[in-house]
Amino acid sequence: MKTVNKCLKLILIIFFSMQITNATSKEALMKEIKDLTYKGYFQFDNSHFINAIGLCERIKTVNPEDAEAIYYSAYSGYRILNIGMVREEASAFNNYYDKTINEASKLFDNKQLSSEAYVVAASAVMMKLAVDKSDAPNLSAKTHGYLDNAEKKDKNNPRIYLTRGIMFYNTPVQFGGGVEKAIKQFEIALKLFENNEAENQKISWGHAETYAWKGQAYLRGNEVELSKQAYEKALNIEPNFGWVEYQLLPQLENASTSSAKSEMDSQTEAATTEAESGTLKIVFENFESNEGKLSIGLHNSKQGYNDNKPFQVGSTEIKNQKVIYSFENIPFGEYAVKCYHDENSNNELDTNLFGIPSEAYGFSNNARGSFGPPDYVESKFNFDSDGQQIKIKLD
């Protein structure tokens, strides 16, 4: 009997020692996982996220239902998709999209991480939307649906409003988005981040990122000083934020220089008695029918382009599924063209329930945006010779 008792004691000692070792090991692994995801985002390096997923799998071999490991596996997958979207790496979506959604869905009913899991799922679908317009209505509905569910689970989760703000930023005003709506969402997120900053939360990403996106929204609205202030706040929170330091701030400086140059050029042009001008000829192709008409907007500034206030407009019928249209006596300079096939002649670009265009549209340079319309810089071209011709393909 004594021998049995000694054996039981030995077994219990070993069991509890293993439990303590596992707990310590899990704590150390989670710290390493969080360090890797931190480095991965701020260094824009998906190798860190891949390593983080590997460590999450180690934790799950001991406890397959470990919620924190499942969450960081899904979050790392989303960030890999984000990098893949920017770098146009299709393999990222082939390898990680379904896995990320599957991991996140495991936590939809988790009491502590449900809202966060819905945000990650929404973010992953948003990346898919950026690279695959063929299923835009379905993907857009999924993104908004996940965010709505996240808000129902925890309306004080700031990452909901960060993600929704990114969606609005990349969705044109006529489709229900725009920078004003985006900024409002970013402001809600920032207020919640500041209120929650003192808490020791398991999930903490997004604060500096929100300021970065808010700065971009300000810049798109030509609020250069406010944009700069937002970027500086992002760097105050995270001094190693490479996206802000090496990309967004230099872009801001270039925009400031271009704005000053544009103002000087305008003053010079105003002082010129007779500016050089000519005829701009545009060939529009890829119409599916001759129904309705083609509506055209010629923009001569970034502000007018963003506000959808053209320098000149045109409208014409379609023949043989093709249009050739000319703008005459146009001063030489920088322009961008927007157009759409107004099939029902109601003078507006029709959209479906989710704000996705249901009529064909196009832009100069055949530019295409990730979520909504392309930026002015992608569509602009130089008009510098009489009779110059460009081609636009409608999709």
Image (cartoon, helix red, strand yellow):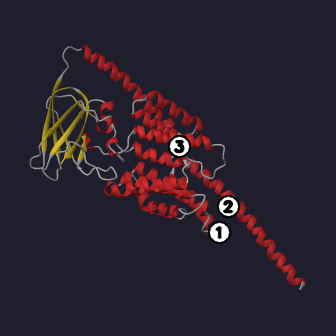
In front of the other: 105 or 49: 105
Residue ID for mark 3: 189
Q: Position of residue 223 (x, y in %)?
A: 43, 29
Going 50% across and 37% down the picture, which residue do you hit?
Answer: 244
**Left or right, residue 198 beside residue 318:** right
Question: Which dot, 1 or 3, sits closer to the camera?
Answer: 3
First in sequence: mark 1 or mark 3? 1
Circle 3: element type? helix
CB of mark 1 within 8 Å of CB of mark 2? yes
Residue ID for mark 2: 26
Amino acid identity at mark 1: Val
First in sequence: mark 2 or mark 3? 2
In front of the other: 268 or 147: 147
Quarter residue 274 falls in: top left
Circle 2: element type? helix
Amino acid identity at mark 2: Lys
Going 49% across and 41% down the picture, which residue do you hit?
Answer: 186
Numbered mark located on residue 359 in the image: none
Going 53% across and 54% down the picture, which residue do you hit?
Answer: 47
Q: Position of residue 295 (x, y in %)?
A: 19, 41
Give the Cα separation between the discs numbered 2 and 3: 31 Å
Circle 1: element type? helix
